[in-house]
Every structure is written in structure tokens, then in C-alpha cells.
């Protein structure tokens, strides 16, 4: 903050023509579409935003391009999710040699352990546990999304102190909308009977949604889409679905539906719509913003589980 | 975040320790960085391996002929292709790195020669992708597919894929399909090699899965991101797996590149979806398979001897030119960022296989063989200054480096004092640092 204040002072006193802090927009890179939307909500037209992994794209397996590294190199602020969500990011940041502030938005979010993560080492006949990763899909709880927004507000204020009041005002208004959204989801899910709260998704992206709103999702894939589900994973899942009496199966916008169609037919279910897990939709789709996405997902989930589609 | 991760890791370890281990203080883990160099001699059928930081840790292996070396399976194994002696030897490197999300585990033992070898008519190009090292037998009309995971465990498990006609080419797996270079079916005089005309999708049993895509004089191949790129007279042909089979695109050389040249050697980045290719003898091209311009040309002051991409800092590649200068290539700016003299001159006049230096990367060092000096030279990527030399008997020539940084669970397991410390590290540099390991 001190550095950007000094820079701002320097520019305004020494060279009026260089027009830095006041006229030039804050150059922001967001790693994927959902935090891109948060950045837009907080930054408005004061930022020049570039999003690396766009709508309907899967950040777990994204192949970064040279243009992405160049965007990082030119950025003032880089917003990432962290928790190893963007596997490409650390090395891309290193390659870009960016001097931007790199902010992992999950920094003060309470992350949950990846279910079934971790591995054992057998050394001298003893099993040593090496912990697995943390589930990175923290934005699926609106309570966590608010922390992302606060982190973005703070990052923008630090990098662009002159416009801080505007960022604070935008964030405050948006946080209020998120509070309303959170209440709305609680009310919708709360209306479901207790025995109709189990669904199936392709990869385990909804752990925070489950924990926050009281549902349960089964999935053939883990928290990353990187490794494919095995035949044993699928067989185990179908068994689990029977035991839990799973009521609905959902496609995801970031992955193809072949595996889920197979599971649906084996379980005698139809796919009950598309959830937006790790990316927004295109602007003309049903989930072009985070709030629209959470509303769409909640509506899709609750109407399928309630059985009144 | 790192602190939080370290905390939760330590907590999980303590919890697990109570349940599964008698005393978690016995199980110390250390951050270890180890690079192991394998060098093939120019004249003698031998491979020398040594640890870069401790070159007295040294092993020598006999083979049949001159060895071109490749590291596979994230550096866990090394393949020695002996084109002039119809043999392929295999080694376990003794350094295995396994990535686990936020960290890598490293395990270090001695390298070993795998007893089984492959023989066949003129093995040449090797491409390592998707757990398979695919070796083309130029006079056999087939490729041998080596399971690199089995190789890392000391076992040679192979299968063959037939090509329509023997030629100096390659085959590579892409998703469920394969592509193979294709030779013309025109007759040739004596044992002259047939002309190479294109690239064809084939099934795993060798049957065609599509038409031959034209790629005149096809030579040089690399994977980066979702793409395979290969050099042709008319441009660089790219292949990706689409929704309905393979998608080919010919990126034609633009008009502003010097006429009459082409790309015949390609390197693929493991960090960004980008290739570095030669363009003629004294030019390089940075090739972006998606965004325009697809080609950005870099003129070198002299002809190229060898080049390499930096897997640690993907912004840079390195090229040695015949005047003995090493140039750092900025892959984003497509320009020479800095240059320094590192060896005596090695003229590119004469045969391609005359003894000349070869480059490999080892973290923040470039490691190059200097056959005439009988040395492996270590050069800092930051300053391009020499930071050390290692004497190697004979004429050190082809070179690969395996290894990287990871957590060693065996290290210091008798040391009771540092049990907590061992788990408190943060894993920043834990990614795959092996240049020859293809993106999966
Ligand atoms: Zn995900
Ligand atoms: Zn060749």
C-alpha cells in the first residue's frame, strides 16, 4: 500500500502526463470465470480484467498459453483460487516473472480435507500417513464467496489506494446481495424432505455446498477432474447410490456427459440437468454470473430432488 | 495459505501417527534436491552417471554402441538408443519423484542397468508420452512401445505397432488413437531411405483411422499441452484430440520468415502450450499452436549446436551456437535475452554426429557436455556464468539429467531432533522438473 501511495504521489507531482493511478485502469488477471465475476463486481469499470480460464472451461486441466503468461506479466493484481485448484498457475506465474500482487482468494477460508485424499508410506514396516490436499471448490458455499469478495476488495485497495472507497462501496453492496442469496439457498434446500437430499455429480465439486446447505453428493471422480474414474469407482458409486437412495443425477458444464449417462442408465435414472461447478456459462447461458450460477444450481438440484420437474 | 497447509498437514500427520505408528518422531522427512546426470561417450559404448552435487557418486555402464539418451517416466528411467548398433539399453535412474498435489516425494537409490535390452534394425527417434516410450525402428517398419512405468520398476514390457513402410520417422499416442509418420511408396535405389510424405492417424493395431495428412519431409515431433507438433516443408502440422477423432492443422510458415528453410526439430514446453523449433540452421521459431502469430522468428548469430527448454522457469529456453556461446531465449518476447561464451567453438561444418556439446537442464543450471574438453560444464541460468565443471573420461556427448526436489521420507530417519521441522516445509518447487517428461 505504501508503495502504491508513493507511486501515485510521484506520478501526480512529477509527471502529470504519465497519467498513472487516476486514469489508467488497474490491470487485473483472474484465473477463472467465477472469480472473474467477483472481480467485476468489486472493480466495476475501474479495472481492466483478463480471465485465463473462461466460461464452461475446466481449470483443473487447463493448458495455459503464452498469451496467459504475458497477461500475468502485465498485471498489477493476480487473483487465484489457490488450494491447488489451478494446477498450472504457480509455474505460469514463475514463467511470467510478474511483479503483480498474487492473491490466493482462499487464504483465510476454512478449507476441508479432500475426502479420501492422502497416501501412506510404508517405511521399515510402519505406515506413515502423508496428508492429501484440501478441497479447492470453496466458492460453492456463499459464506466462503463473501471471503473471496473481501479479499478482492482488500487487494484492489492495496494496489490502487486512490479508488479504494469505490471498491469498498461496490464490495459492500455485493456482499449484501450474497447474504440474500445465501438465505435464499438455505430456504430452498431447507424445504426438501430429509430423505430426498442425495444427488450424483461427475466430480466432487460440491463438498462445501453440501456442508453449508445440508445435502449430499456422490461422485465417481474426486476433487479433481484430472484422473478418470475407473470401472471399480463406477461400480462402487452405483452401490453407494442404492444405499443412499440417490434421487437425481446431474451433468456438469465443464465435463462431457458420457460417464454420467452410463451411470444414469445403470442406476435407472435420467440426467436431471446441468450444474455449473467450476465455471460460469457464456453470457447468454443460465449462469453468466456467480449469483445466477448459484440460483440456477439450487433450482436444478431442489426441483430434481423434490421430484417435481 | 502455505502456513495453513503446513499446519493441516502436520496435524494430519500427528493424528495419523497416533493411529498407525508407534512413535512419529522416528519418521523424519527432509526436503531433498538431487540432479543425476547421465552422459553417453562419443566413441565408446558406455554411459556414465553421476550426481551433479556430488560427482564422486559415479556409475559406469557398458552398452553396445554410441548412446543417445532419453529420460522417461518423470526421470525414473533412462533409455539409451544406439542407432548405429541396432540396440536399445535401459536404466533405472535411481531417482523417483511422485507428485502428490501440494508436494512431491523423492526417493533416491543407485541407478541400475536393466538386463533386458531391445535389438532391431536402426532404432532412432524416441517419443515419451502418456506412459509410453515409443521407439521408431527406421529399417524395421515398426515402433516398439515401452511401458515406462514398468521400466521405472526395472521391467521391460513392450509391444509393437507396425507401419506401412520402414522409414526414418515416429509414432505417437494421442488419446485412444495413434499417429505415425508415413513414407512414400515410390521405389528407391539400394538401401536409400524413402521420402517422407505425411502423418496418418492409426488404431492401436496399426490399421488406418483416417487419411494421410500432407507433411512433406516430416521430421521432428514434440508434445505440449493438448498438442502434438511436427515439422514439415510447408509448415508445422499440429494434432489434437477433438470430439470426433483427431484434428489436424497445418500452420504454414509466414512470408516474413526467411525463404527456403523449415522446422525439423521441435521442443515442447511442459508449463505453457508452446513449442520451440529450429528454423533452418541459424534460426529458431517460437510456435503458438492456438494464438496468432503462430510463428515468431529469432535469428541466431551463428548456427545452432543444440537447444533445450527450461522446465523450472518456462519463460526461457537455451541454445548453444557454434561459436561456443550460450543464449538465453525469452519464449514470451521471442528474443535472445542474454548470451555468454561457455565453450571453445564447435563448427557445424562436417557430419551432424561429430562430437559437439549437448545441453540438458538441472533446476537453475544448464548442464552441457564439452566433448573436446572432457567435461560436463555447469552454467547458471541466471547469469550464464560457469558455476562448476565435472571431469568425465573420454568424450562426453549425449546427456540427460533426471531428478528435482521433493520430500524424502527415508532421509534422516534416525534423527530424532527434526521430526516436526521435516513436515513444516512448504512445497513450492515440487512440480515435475524433468524436461523429457511429457505432459499428460
Ligand atoms: Zn473441480
Ligand atoms: Zn530424425
Image (cartoon, rainbow, N blue to C red):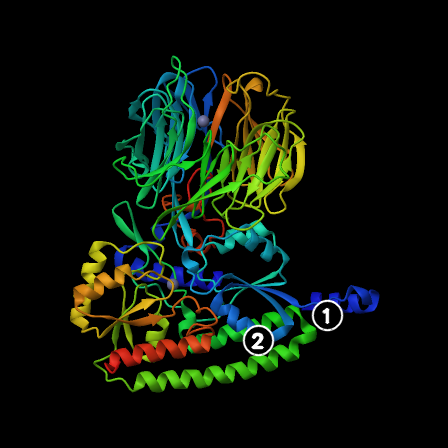
Whether residue B403 is visible: no
Q: x and y percent of residue B264 in the render?
A: 50, 31
Q: Which residue is mark 2?
A: A42
Mark 1 closeness class: few <14, some 14–19, many ≥20 residues within 10 Å = few
Foreground mark, 2 or 1?
1
Q: Name the residue at the front extreme.
A: B186
Query: Which numbered disc covers residue B72?
Result: none
Q: Identify the secondary structure beneath mark 1.
A: loop
Front-most of residues B308 and B75: B308
Examine the image and state in which quarter residue A254 appears.
bottom left
Q: x and y percent of residue B216 in the render?
A: 46, 31
Up-down: is B228 above or below B166?
Answer: below
Q: Identify the secondary structure beneath mark 2.
A: helix
Whether residue A183 is visible: yes
Examine the image and state in which quarter residue A214 appears.
bottom left
Query: Which numbered disc covers residue A23?
Result: 1
Q: Chain of mark 1?
A: A
Amino acid at each position: 500500500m505504501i508503495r502504491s501511495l508513493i507511486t501515485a504521489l510521484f506520478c501526480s507531482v512529477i509527471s502529470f502526463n504519465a497519467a498513472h493511478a487516476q486514469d489508467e485502469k488497474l490491470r487485473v488477471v483472474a484465473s477463472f470465470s467465477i472469480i472473474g465475476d467477483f472481480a467485476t463486481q468489486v472493480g466495476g469499470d475501474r479495472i481492466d480484467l483478463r480471465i485465463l480460464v473462461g466460461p464452461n472451461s475446466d481449470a483443473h486441466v487447463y493448458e495455459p498459453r503464452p498469451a496467459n503468461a504475458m497477461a500475468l506479466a502485465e498485471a498489477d493484481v493476480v487473483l487465484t483460487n489457490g488450494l491447488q485448484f489451478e494446477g498450472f498457475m504457480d509455474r505460469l506465474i514463475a514463467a511470467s516473472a510478474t511483479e503483480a500482487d498474487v492473491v490466493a482468494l482462499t487464504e483465510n477460508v476454512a478449507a476441508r480435507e479432500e475426502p479420501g485424499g492422502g497416501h501412506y508410506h510404508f517405511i521399515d514396516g510402519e505406515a506413515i500417513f502423508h496428508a492429501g490436499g484440501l478441497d479447492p471448490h470453496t466458492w460453492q458455499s456463499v459464506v466462503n464467496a463473501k471471503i473471496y469478495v473481501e479479499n478482492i476488495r482488500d487487494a484492489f485497495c492495496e494496489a490502487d489506494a486512490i479508488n479504494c472507497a469505490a471498491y469498498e462501496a461496490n464490495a459492500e453492496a455485493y456482499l449484501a446481495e450474497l447474504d440474500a442469496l445465501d438465505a435464499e439457498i438455505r430456504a430452498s434446500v431447507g424445504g426438501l424432505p430429509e430423505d430426498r437430499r442425495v444427488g450424483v455429480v461427475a466430480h466432487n465439486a460440491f463438498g462445501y455446498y453440501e456442508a453449508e446447505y445440508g445435502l449430499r453428493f456422490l461422485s465417481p471422480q474426486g476433487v479433481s477432474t484430472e484422473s478418470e474414474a475407473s470401472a471399480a469407482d463406477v461400480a462402487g458409486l452405483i452401490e453407494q447410490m442404492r444405499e443412499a437412495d440417490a434421487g437425481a443425477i446431474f451433468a456438469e458444464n465443464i465435463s462431457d456427459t458420457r460417464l454420467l449417462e452410463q451411470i444414469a442408465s445403470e442406476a435407472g435414472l435420467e440426467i436431471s440437468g446441468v450444474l455449473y461447478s467450476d465455471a460460469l456459462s457464456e453470457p447468454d447461458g443460465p449462469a453468466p454470473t456467480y449469483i445466477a450460477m448459484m440460483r440456477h444450481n439450487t433450482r436444478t438440484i431442489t426441483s430434481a430432488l423434490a421430484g417435481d420437474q | 495459505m502455505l502456513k495453513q497447509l503446513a499446519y493441516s498437514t502436520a496435524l494430519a500427520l500427528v493424528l495419523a501417527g497416533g493411529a498407525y505408528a508407534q512413535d512419529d518422531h522416528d519418521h523424519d522427512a527432509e526436503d531433498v534436491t538431487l540432479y543425476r546426470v547421465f552422459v553417453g561417450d562419443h566413441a565408446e559404448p558406455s554411459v556414465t552417471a553421476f550426481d551433479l552435487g556430488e560427482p564422486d557418486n559415479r556409475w559406469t555402464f557398458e552398452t553396445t554402441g554410441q548412446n543417445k539418451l532419453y529420460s522417461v517416466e518423470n526421470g525414473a528411467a533412462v533409455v539409451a538408443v544406439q542407432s548405429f548398433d541396432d540396440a536399445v539399453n535401459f536404466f533405472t535412474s535411481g531417482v523417483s519423484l511422485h507428485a502428490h498435489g501440494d508436494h512431491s516425494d523423492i526417493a533416491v537409490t543407485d541407478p541400475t542397468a536393466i538386463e533386458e535390452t531391445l535389438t532391431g534394425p536402426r532404432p532412432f527417434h524416441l517419443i515419451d508420452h502418456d506412459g509410453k516410450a515409443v521407439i521408431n525402428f527406421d529399417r524395421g517398419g515398426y515402433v516398439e512401445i515401452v511401458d515406462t512405468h514398468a521400466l521405472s520398476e526395472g521391467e521391460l514390457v513392450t509391444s509393437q505397432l507396425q507401419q506401412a513402410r520402414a522409414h526414418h520417422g515416429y509414432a505417437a499416442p494421442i488419446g485412444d488413437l495413434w499417429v505415425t509418420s508415413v513414407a512414400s511408396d515410390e521405389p528407391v535405389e539400394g538401401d536409400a531411405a524413402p521420402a517422407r510424405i505425411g502423418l496418418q492417424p492409426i488404431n492401436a493395431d496399426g490399421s488406418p483411422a483416417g487419411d494421410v495428412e500432407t507433411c512433406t519431409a516430416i521430421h521432428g515431433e514434440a508434445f505440449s499441452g493438448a498438442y502434438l507438433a511436427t515439422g514439415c516443408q510447408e509448415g508445422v502440422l499440429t494434432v489434437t484430440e477433438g470430439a470426433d477423432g483427431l484434428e489436424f492443422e497445418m500452420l504454414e510458415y509466414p512470408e516474413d520468415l526467411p525463404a527456403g528453410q523449415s522446422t525439423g526439430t521441435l521442443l515442447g514446453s511442459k508449463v505453457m502450450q508452446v513449442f520451440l523449433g529450429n528454423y533452418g540452421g541459424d534460426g529458431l521459431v517460437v510456435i503458438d499452436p492456438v494464438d496468432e502469430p503462430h510463428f515468431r522468428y529469432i535469428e541466431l548469430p551463428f548456427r545452432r549446436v543444440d537447444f533445450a527448454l527450461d522446465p523450472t522457469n518456462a519463460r526461457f529456453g537455451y541454445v548453444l551456437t557454434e561459436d561456443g556461446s550460450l543464449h538465453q531465449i525469452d519464449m514470451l518476447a521471442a528474443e535472445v535475452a542474454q548470451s555468454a561464451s561457455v565453450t571453445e567453438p564447435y563448427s557445424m561444418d562436417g557430419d551432424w554426429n561429430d562430437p559437439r556439446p549437448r545441453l540438458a537442464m538441472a533446476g537453475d543450471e544448464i548442464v552441457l557436455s564439452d566433448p573436446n574438453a572432457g567435461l560436463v560444464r555447469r552454467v547458471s541460468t541466471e547469469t550464464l556464468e560457469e558455476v562448476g565443471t565435472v571431469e568425465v573420461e573420454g568424450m562426453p556427448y549425449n546427456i540427460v539429467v533426471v531428478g528435482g526436489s521433493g520430500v524424502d521420507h527415508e532421509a534422516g530417519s534416525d534423527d530424532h531432533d527434526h521430526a516436526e521441522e521435516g513436515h513444516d516445509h512448504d512445497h513450492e518447487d515440487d512440480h515435475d522438473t524433468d524436461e523429457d517428461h511429457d505432459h499428460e
